[in-house]
Image (spheres, rainbow, N blue to C red):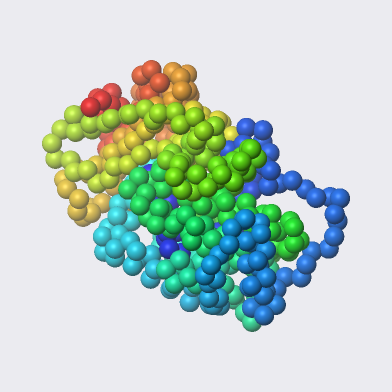
Amino acid sequence: MGARGALRGTALVVLAVLFLAGVAALASLGDPAGESAGTTTTAKRALPPARSARTIRELRPERVLARVEALRGLKLEKPPKFVVLTPRQARRQVEKAEDREAGGATSKREDRINVQLVTLLGLLPKGVDLDELAGRITSQGTLGYYDGDKNEMTIISKGPDFPVGVETTVAHELTHAIDDEHFHVFRTVQRTRDDGDAELAYRSVVEGNASEVEERYRRKYRIPQPDPKGDAEQQALLRDLPFGLQLQLGFPYAIGQNFVEALRGQPRGEELLAKALGSRRPKTSVEILDPSRWVTRLPVVRTPLNPRRALGRGWTELDADTIGAADVLALLAPSEREASDAALLSRTWRGGEYRFLRRGGVAERGCGVPCTKRDAVVGSAAFSSDQDARSFGAQFGQVLERHRHAKKAGVATWTLDGGAAAVGSVGTRATFAYAPTPELAVKLVREAPGD
């Protein structure tokens, strides 16, 4: 669930989303102590930063690779080729790679369905062009990426000189190259794509590890970093990105880095990290939010749904997938104001799933975005306690009323955007629904849970 499905980076071309200036602040969402090992200061060594490399020759890729190998503790047998592209060239290259991997027309249909879903859920404002937004992220918010198929490291530069901070981006991407050579991480990401939460969990280990190495590289070699406030294009991009989307894009980097730091802080931490990248990969995003869940491997609670029991005939299922802890976080935190409470509740997640259906077939004729007159979605999640399930319902309603101008239409029922929403809980399980009418939303909440 979520806009990450339409914006996720290809498993072959892993993007370092550098423009997310607030990504470091997200780290505290996955850290009960509110601190991350990656934020440790080094005030005792107040040395001036090294000058940022401006060309391939100044960057000295072989030196950067040797440093990354030492920090990572693993060697790269086949160093990548380095190329430099303009933002426009990089955008075209990434789009071609993603189209090739995802399957062309099939992928475009899936992306349209995803946009309909996340707009109906309120994760995206109406009228957002995700293709245009994804292109801006590549061309304006990224300094470089690594293509595992070509074994090629691309640096994106707007002028004759490299942008400030490119060396740490290269360190991040070379970590991906090392991890792929040793653990086949790109292939594993690809294999997990049928389960959105499992894919996000594993990508969080991959990106979190690269971010942790990048952070140690930056501190050790005092590499200057760009000032996000000094780039007007990046500031405009940040303003256009909804907070929930920033959470989803930043999750693998910030929360993933917390996860990796937690493993590395344990005895035999490198062995634990190797297991997380290889034989014992996390399968749920709650394990990333709460690393102790990865250690204990608590079983996931089944939350089966049968929406046709409530809807009757004439409805076609468009999509179905897991609702993970990261999805709960995004649903309940459309702004920074709600993020802390949403993160605490997300850590109590025990299982979840959703179904997205359309009345009258899959054709989009007569549909806006969202298609409130024909579409329905029902989602259900299990939590640690009855109180947690009730808290989900309370926070869900607050989000509707604060951010989506919803009007009460009954107990735990609202009208909004030409449709309706409802929420309820039974025991440790909470269920929510969006539907064309309040009556249908309530019926989904009451009747859809179960085999």
- Give the image location of residue 293, x and y in percent: 50, 32
Seen from the viewer's position, the closer of residues 38 and 165 is: 38
Residue at 64%, 61% in the rendered image: 68
In the picture, the quarter occupied by the C terminus is top left
In the depicted structure, whether residue 208 falls above or below residue 438: below
| Residue 154 seen in render | no
In the depicted structure, whether residue 362 falls above or below residue 47: above
Give the total number of marks visible in the rendering. 0
Seen from the viewer's position, the closer of residues 414 and 27 is: 27
In the depicted structure, whether residue 37 falls above or below residue 234: above
Residue at 27%, 58% in the rendered image: 109
- Give the image location of residue 271, x and y in percent: 56, 44
Among all residues in the image, which is located at the extreme left? 313
From the viewer's perspective, is 216 left or right of 286?
A: right
Residue at 74%, 58% in the rendered image: 220
Seen from the viewer's position, the closer of residues 346 and 61 is: 61
From the viewer's perspective, is 297 left or right of 309?
A: right
From the viewer's perspective, is 342 left or right of 354?
A: right
Residue at 35%, 45% in the rendered image: 195
- Give the image location of residue 396, x and y in percent: 45, 31
In the picture, the quarter occupied by the N terminus is top left
| Residue 348 seen in render | yes
- Give the image location of residue 419, x and y in percent: 31, 38
